Each structure stands twice: as structure tokens, then as C-alpha cells.
Image: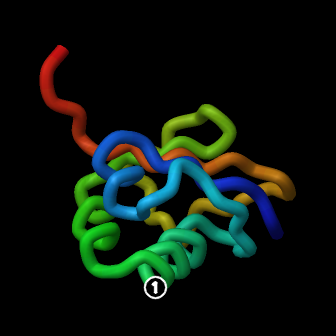
């Protein structure tokens, strides 16, 4: 499936872009491909991040068990500082 991945805050800085298209059927595959494209700095951010799929929190679910519907928007939310 294809969709859009959006990077916020530190994830955006690590990826060097705000968003990009992806191809993948489950969240784990999309994240692995993004880290492969953008490098270890993004990988470090992703390991500490939470995720939304079409606005719904993934929570503690295993990313390998989170299916992505066609056209889904995945948002990578690193821990935010401040308030």
C-alpha cells in the first residue's frame, strides 16, 4: 500500500524533510524503509517515538502488527520537550 509519512520536530530534523510518500503494508516496514533512506540518526529518533496512523495512536502495539490501509498517513512523533 502507499501513503504519506510525516515527520515532526526531531524526526523532521533527522530525516531532513517534513514528509514523503511510502510504500508498505505494515508500519514496521515503512519505518524500516525510512531509516534505511535517512540513516541512523532517524533510527535513534524512531526508537523513541510514538506514531499515529490516520490520526489514531498506535500505542504499545508492535509496529509489525499495525496494518496500513491504502492512502494512510503515518505521523512520527518524537518526545517533545517544553510545554
Viewer-closest of 15 and 26? 15
Query: Seen from this angle, which residue lies furthest bottom?
Result: 36
The residue identified by callout 1 is 36
Hey, which quadrant is residue 33 in on the image?
Answer: bottom right
Q: Is residue 27 above or below residue 12?
A: below
Decide if residue 48 is on the left or right side of residue 25: left
Viewer-closest of 57 and 47? 47
Hey, which quadrant is residue 2 in on the image?
Answer: bottom right
Query: Seen from this angle, which residue lies furthest top?
Result: 83
Q: Is residue 78 above or below residue 15?
A: above
Viewer-closest of 64 and 38? 38
Check the image and tell me how it is coloured. Answer: rainbow
The percent position of residue 74, horizontal first and vertical second, equals 60, 50
Q: Is residue 83 above or below residue 74?
A: above
- Report the residue at 75% width, 50% height from top: 72
The percent position of residue 6, horizontal first and vertical second, equals 56, 48
Decide if residue 62 is on the left or right side of residue 14: right
How many circles with numbers are drawn on the protein?
1
Q: Is residue 35 above or below residue 83?
A: below
Mark 1 secondary-structure assignment: helix
The percent position of residue 32, horizontal first and vertical second, equals 48, 79
Query: Seen from this angle, which residue lies furthest front?
Result: 16
The percent position of residue 1, horizontal first and vertical second, equals 82, 69
Hey, which quadrant is residue 9 in on the image?
Answer: top left
Viewer-closest of 7 and 73? 7
- Report the residue at 51% width, 73% height from top: 34
Decide if residue 70 is on the left or right side of residue 52: right
- Report the residue at 24% width, 56% height from top: 48
- Report the residue at 48% width, 49% height from top: 7
Q: Residues within 10 Å of mark 1 (few under 14, many from 20)?
A: few
Amino acid at each position: 500500500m502507499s501513503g504519506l509519512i510525516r515527520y515532526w520536530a526531531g524526526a523532521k530534523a533527522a530525516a531532513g524533510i517534513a514528509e514523503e510518500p511510502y510504500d508498505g503494508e505494515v508500519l514496521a516496514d515503512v519505518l524500516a524503509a525510512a531509516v534505511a533512506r535517512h540513516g541512523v540518526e532517524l533510527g535513534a529518533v524512531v526508537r523513541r517515538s510514538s506514531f499515529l496512523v490516520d490520526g489514531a495512536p498506535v500505542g504499545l502495539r508492535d509496529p509489525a502488527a499495525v496494518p496500513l490501509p491504502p492512502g494512510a498517513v503515518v505521523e512520527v512523533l518524537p518526545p517533545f520537550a517544553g510545554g
